[in-house]
């Protein structure tokens, strides 16, 4: 993750937790800047380094208002560890808490309800192999069937099983999700998935017959994606994070750090 200098405010936390707070707050404000927010719905969470807890947004606060000190700290039993005037969204706890418990390699989970993301989540065939952007993601993509608003813990095991070791997921009839070892990774996975969904919706809206590459080309491109977007690839996911944060600071300043 990008290291940033931030004015420390309450709550008093370790340096590692404060950096996690700063990165997560940046992701929330970037989500708003990019037009992916849904009022105060949806969530991004990050594991607190060295603790059995994670950080998540105060339910009812807009994403553009979220700063490092405003984030809620929740344990894996759903207990708020630092007092706040805001609650956390139960659906966010069920989704994010389950993944943080099940995937030791995942430190950040991101979930969105965007226009393009939900449009593709509504389509029976999901993400189509009709763009380079979609094809290079397909080796990392999973799906989870809609079971209603995620308010029941019984869905957690099915969600975890469907995600497997994937990095991105389409929650059918619901939205998009990404995970990563860092906030940077989860954010960039979401950026790529959101872009692929937008391209698909725009292509279908044109009304012309879509060009589907031959099967051998599709397989080749999926394999290329596994290489170039992986940890050793030249387009490894998340390497752009410092530049993305600078974009946020040019647009909105550094309030996210407080």
Image (cartoon, grey):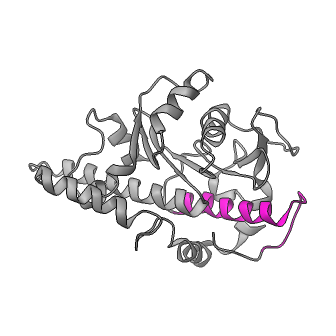
Across and down, in percent, residue 154 comes to 59, 20
Q: Main secondary structure of the magenta part?
A: helix
Rendered residue at 10%/52% (across/down): 214
Q: Is residue 53 left or right of residue 122?
A: right
Identify whether 123 is placed above or below 51: above
Across and down, in percent, residue 40 comes to 62, 45
- Residue in the foreground of this view, choosing between 104 and 137: 104
Q: Is residue 28 magenta?
A: yes
- Residue in the foreground of this view, choosing between 30 and 138: 138
Identify whether 195 is placed above or below 242: above
Q: Quadrant of the C terminus?
A: bottom right
Rendered residue at 77%/45% (across/down): 53
Rendered residue at 47%/65% (across/down): 231
Across and down, in percent, residue 223 comes to 28, 57
Across and down, in percent, residue 236 comes to 45, 68
Rendered residue at 45%/69% (across/down): 232
Asked where in the image residue 235 lies, by quadrant, the reply is: bottom left
Region rendered in magenta: 6-33
Q: Is residue 101 left or right of residue 228?
A: right
Asked where in the image residue 100 lies, by quadrant, the reply is: top right
């Amino acid at each position: 993750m990008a290291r940033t200098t931030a004015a420390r405010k309450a709550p008093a936390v370790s340096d590692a937790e404060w950096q996690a707070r700063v990165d997560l707050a940046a992701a929330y404000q970037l989500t708003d800047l990019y037009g992916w927010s849904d009022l105060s719905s949806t969530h991004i969470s990050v594991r607190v380094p060295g603790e059995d807890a994670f950080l998540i947004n105060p339910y009812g606060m807009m994403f553009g208002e979220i700063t490092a000190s405003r984030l809620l700290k929740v344990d894996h039993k759903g207990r708020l560890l630092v007092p706040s005037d805001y609650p956390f969204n139960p659906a966010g706890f069920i989704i994010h808490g389950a993944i943080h418990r099940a995937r030791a390699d995942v430190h950040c989970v991101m979930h969105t309800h965007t226009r393009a993301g939900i449009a593709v989540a509504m389509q029976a065939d999901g993400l189509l192999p009709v763009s380079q952007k979609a094809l290079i993601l397909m080796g990392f993509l999973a799906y989870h069937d809609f079971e209603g608003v995620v308010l029941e813990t019984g869905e957690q095991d099915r969600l975890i099983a469907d995600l497997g070791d994937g990095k991105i997921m389409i929650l059918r009839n619901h939205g998009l999700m990404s995970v990563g070892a860092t906030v940077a990774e989860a954010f960039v996975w979401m950026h790529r998935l959101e872009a692929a969904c937008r391209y698909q919706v725009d292509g279908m809206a044109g009304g012309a017959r879509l060009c589907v590459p031959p099967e051998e080309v599709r397989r080749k491109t999926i394999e290329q994606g596994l290489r170039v977007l992986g940890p050793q690839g030249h387009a490894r996911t998340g390497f752009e994070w410092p530049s993305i944060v600078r974009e946020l600071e040019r647009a909105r300043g550094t309030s996210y750090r407080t």
